Image (tube, grey):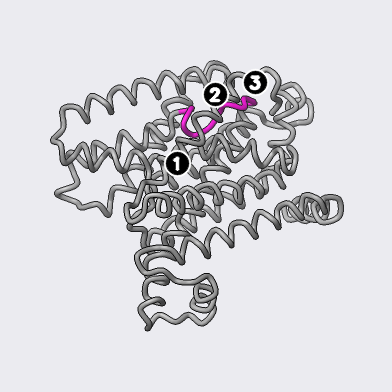
Amino acid sequence: MKETIKLKARSFLQGGQGKGTKITLLLVLLTICGIISIGIGTLSISPLHVVELLFTGDRDSAEGLVVWSFRLPRFVLAIIAGAALAVSGTVLQGVVRNPLASPDIVGVTSGASMVAVCYLAFLNEKLGMGFMPLFAFAGAALVSLFIYILSWKKGISPFRMILVGLAVTSLLEAGKTLFLIFSPIFLTSQAQIWITGSIYGAKWGNVLALLPWFCVLFALLLLMSRKLDIQILGEETTISLGGRLQLQRIALIGIASALAGSAIAFVGGIGFIGLMAPHIARRLVGGTHFVLLIASAIVGALLLGGADLMGRLLFSPKDVAAGVFTAVLGAPFFLYLLMTSRKNEV
């Protein structure tokens, strides 16, 4: 495994200078987005002062307290969650070999949202909001397992999995809507904000809880990137090269669901990141998954970090949920993909 990583890294460094430049530019954009996002708000801080506060670690001044206690954890949580959703979408599109696949389409987001709404209704007063991410993650995992079992017929067919995912998503969305209609108005409002997706009120505890999940699962996917490259070529090629097709699919879909579920558990039902980011990254660095996964993670981080920035900047002093902006961008993008899907290649 280590040799595989070294080989991919060497190939990336030697033959992918253009890709490396693009990834570097994405990182620069993400850094600029972070400095602006951390600086804006009721207490406005200049970009240079933001950089100074970050390097000096000053937490005693009013500006330092705001940066280190409120705005920095919010931005860091946004980029980790955005990266997790994007990488999950990249893997699902690769395994299913469908450009429209994403955590939203295969039911992971709906599963987490449905369980979160039930938690708000029945357990919130007893347990508090601290346990809701755990239940949301469990919902995503259970729905993924349920879809996988329903899709099984002498193995998993990507097309059947998409259809089952769409059907389960529709059922969950209908159940969630009915649940909200018959719930008290305060509960409906609270649940609707969570379902839309927001990073408001993020704390370092959230970051520290999500970061290990992302690091471990992302590293596993980098190790399995070659298997993803082979799966793109088709089932027969995978089997002829000695690959255990179904076992690889179970592992890849399980990791993708865990990544998306863990992100949704902390930032709510933010949609379309897993759909948009892989396509943008693929246009920039091509379809080799070792590089594509890295680029998708950065693009996803940029999309969610940028959406959160727009939510705080455009309607200040109101704080609009980031999920609103990802939906505004993602819905037309989805329609565009739908209309041109015959021409696109995964």
How dense is the environment of label 2, judged by Cα within 10 Å: few (below 14), some, or many (20 and up)? few
Dot 1 or dot 2: first in sequence order is 1
Q: Position of residue 252 (x, y in %)?
A: 58, 37
- Check whether the beta carbons of the residues at disc 1 and disc 2 lie within 8 A of each other: no
- Circle number at residue 325: 1
Dot 2 or dot 3: first in sequence order is 2
- Range of magenta residues: 97-106
Q: Position of residue 86 (x, y in %)?
A: 56, 42
Dot 1 or dot 3: first in sequence order is 1
Left or right: residue 171 compared with residue 6: left
Q: Position of residue 331 (x, y in %)?
A: 49, 30
In the structure shown, which secondary structural element does the residue marked by tag 2 occupy? helix
Residue picked out by circle 3: 340
Q: Say which amino acid is labelled 2.
A: Leu
Task: Decide: is 215 above or below 161.
Answer: below
The image quarter in which residue 242 lies: top right
- Circle number at residue 32: none
In the structure shown, which secondary structural element does the residue marked by tag 3 occupy? helix
The image quarter in which residue 239 lies: top right
- Is residue 101 found inside the magenta-colored segment of the image? yes
Residue picked out by circle 2: 335
How dense is the environment of label 1, judged by Cα within 10 Å: few (below 14), some, or many (20 and up)? many
- Check whether the beta carbons of the residues at disc 1 and disc 3 lie within 8 A of each other: no
Q: Residue at x 47, y 40 (%)?
A: 326
